[in-house]
Amino acid sequence: MNAMIGRKIGMTQVFGESNVMVPVTVLEVGPCVVTQIKTKDKDGYSAVQLGFGSKKPGKVNKPTAGHLAKSKAQPVQVMQEFRVDDAAGYRLGQVITADIFAAGDKIKIAGTTKGKGTAGVMKRHKFHGGPASHGQTDRNRHAGAVGSGSSPGRVYPGTKMAGHMGDVKFSVRNLKVVKVDQSKNIILVKGAVPGAPDGIVSIHKI
Amino acid sequence: MNKQAVIKSIEAEQTKSDLQEFRAGDTVKVQVRVIEGDKERLQAFQGVVIQKRGRGIGASFTVRKISGGVGVERIFPLHSPNIAAVDVIKRGDVRRAKLFYLRKLTGKAAKVAQKREVAAPVPAVK
């Protein structure tokens, strides 16, 4: 397996190589349980579906409970599918732990970024805003012009404007694993990871 | 899982517990591990602590000294393994937690008064 589901715990610092301070994100990774195996014959592609976290049994709806019963897994908080080259080596109910990662591994982490609500163009698109002086009024955080004149006579689709920001799926590539604590299911990753603490992230080896 | 407890336990692994207590105004000798080639030796940096900041694993302190007539400040991470020891040479008597005013002073005015130890009160004899 080269990917897992985890939960962001928070950030701190550790002293790394040659005692340099390294900013790290603490992630609770797994244990993940294999809840479904997709094969080329049956589904057209090979993949493994993993489940992570826990849920009260009463909070699981019947279709999900039936799906989980096939792998005899406890109720899980999230399930996510990961493509694999060959699904033959996996079996239902198999538990995947953080030991698939090792210190020094390069990884990609995907998660949902913090929602910022409706945001202006300066925050959302890093616009510079308007001039502060030379007779300008009420333009400090405005975008400026959004289009030309009568030709084309319209604003192009996709023009950067104010609107909803954040709460979208986002990946960070080339993060480095600093430490793996398999007994606690915890890994430390150098740098920041999308989302708030308690956010669900997927961790992929690259 | 308690998130703060997890982070605390990670920090606790690296936090030093055997540090001698010191504060701003104290004159300290910081023993810094220096690696030269494949040899390791201790280099001392002696001066006045002008600030202590932060808590937990990220705490640091700034030491100021006058070297060759030029003020030199070094910021040390308190819990860095590179800091072998922080020896207190002299306790300073100051009224501030941050002694940035020392930067503007020179000569005798830049000296921090030594704290006079208050003798333990003599128990009253009846």
Image (cartoon, rainbow, N blue to C red):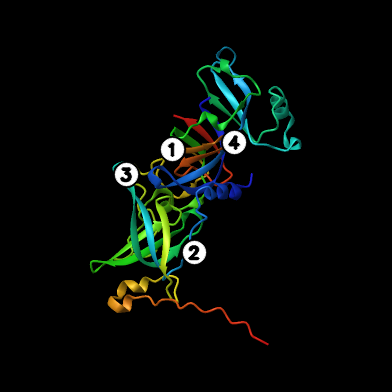
Marks 4,3: beta carbons within 8 A:
no
What separation in Å lies between label 4 and label 3 (alpha carbons)? 36 Å
Q: Spatial distance from mark 3 to mark 1, Cα to Cα? A: 32 Å
The type of residue carrying mark 4 is Ser
* Tags 3 and 2 on a common chain: yes
* On-image quarter of the C terminus of chain A: top left
Name the residue nearer the viewer: A47 or B2. Answer: B2
Instruction: Report whether residue A139 is seen.
Output: no
Find the distance from the CA under tag 3 to the CA under tag 2: 30 Å
The chain holding disc 3 is B
Instruction: Identify the mark at residue A183; answer none if there is no mark.
Output: 4
Mark yes or no: residue B40 visible: yes
Give, as a three-letter code, the residue at label 2: Glu
Check disc 1 and report its element: helix, strand or loop. Answer: strand
The answer to which image quadrant residue B62 occupies is bottom left
- Front position among marks 2 and 4: 2
Query: Label 1 marks which chain's residue?
Result: A
Where residue A187 appears, x then y in whole percent? 52, 38
Could you tell me how far apart the alpha carbons at marks 1 and 4 are, in whole angstroms? Answer: 22 Å
Tag 4 or tag 1, which sits nearer the N-term? 1
The residue tagged 1 is A175
Farthest front residue?
A: B125
User: Pointer 3 and pointer 2: residues touching (CB < 8 Å)?
Assistant: no
Q: Residue A197 at x, y = what percent?
A: 56, 46
Depth check, mark 2 against mark 1: the one in front is 2
Q: Amino acid at mark 3?
A: Lys
Circle 3 is placed at which residue position? Answer: B39
**Residue B21: numbered disc:** 2
